Image (cartoon, grey):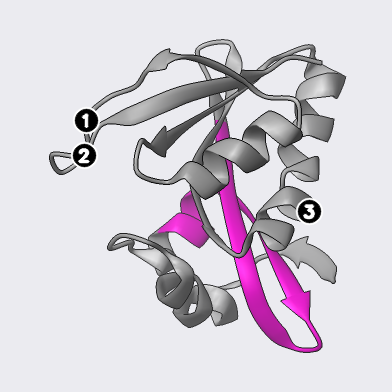
Amino acid sequence: MHVRDATADDADAVTRLAATDVDADRLVRDRTVRVACVDDEVVGFLAYDTWRGAVHVTRFGGDGDAVAELLAAPREFATRESLPVEMVVPESDDGVAGLLTEEGFEETGPGPVFDGERTMRFRWAP
């Protein structure tokens, strides 16, 4: 698996992998977005930004292996800047919650409700 920065050419793949509607063109322009590729196919993506004293993973998609691989970029940035990484995950997504726990993230409580779906907050500190 190869991980690289996303480009405008990846917008269709990001849209396909996103669990919810996403303006992928805008996402790639406005956030740091990394994609995981197998051969030349994008199999995962992760977008993150920094504000309020943390690195926030704002969107992600793809299989668990791709997401696990993609988490390296925000964690490396967070380590350099001495910041935590925070994510919110739908309560119904046990797979990602389990993956985050395996990757050293801790559940820190309930998150916001998006489109009627409850979320859980996760945090990783360097």
Q: Of helix, strand and loop, which one carries label 2?
A: loop
Residue 78's quadrant in the figure? top right
Whole-percent x, y for residue 108 in the image: 50, 12
Tag nearer the camera, 2 or 3: 2
Disc number placed over residue 69 in the picture, else none: 3
In the visual, does 101 lie left or right of 9? Answer: right
Q: Residue at x 41, y 72 (%)?
A: 15
Q: Is residue 76 above or below residue 6?
A: above
What residue would you read off at disc 2? 117
Image quarter in which the N terminus is found: bottom right
Whole-percent x, y for residue 33 in the image: 61, 54
Q: Of helix, strand and loop, which one carries label 1?
A: loop
Q: From mark 1 to mark 2, how far is it between C-alphas? A: 5 Å
Residue 73's quadrant in the figure? top right
Region of the chain picked out in magenta, as a range: 27-49
Provide the major secondary structure of the magenta segment: strand
Instruction: Classify mark 3: residues with Cα within 10 Å, few (<14), some (14-19) or many (20+).
Output: some
Amino acid, disc 1: Val
Question: Furthest residue to the left?
Answer: 116
Residue 117's quadrant in the figure? top left
Q: Residue at x 51, y 79 (%)?
A: 13
What residue would you read off at disc 1? 113
Q: From mark 3 to mark 1, how far is it between C-alphas? A: 27 Å
Q: From mark 2 to mark 3, how far is it between C-alphas? A: 26 Å
Instruction: Tell me whether circle 1 and circle 2 mark residues in contact (CB < 8 Å).
Output: yes
Q: Residue at x 48, y 43 (%)?
A: 94
Q: Is residue 73 above or below residue 22?
A: above
Nearer-N-terminus badge (3/1): 3
Q: Residue at x 68, y 16 (%)?
A: 84
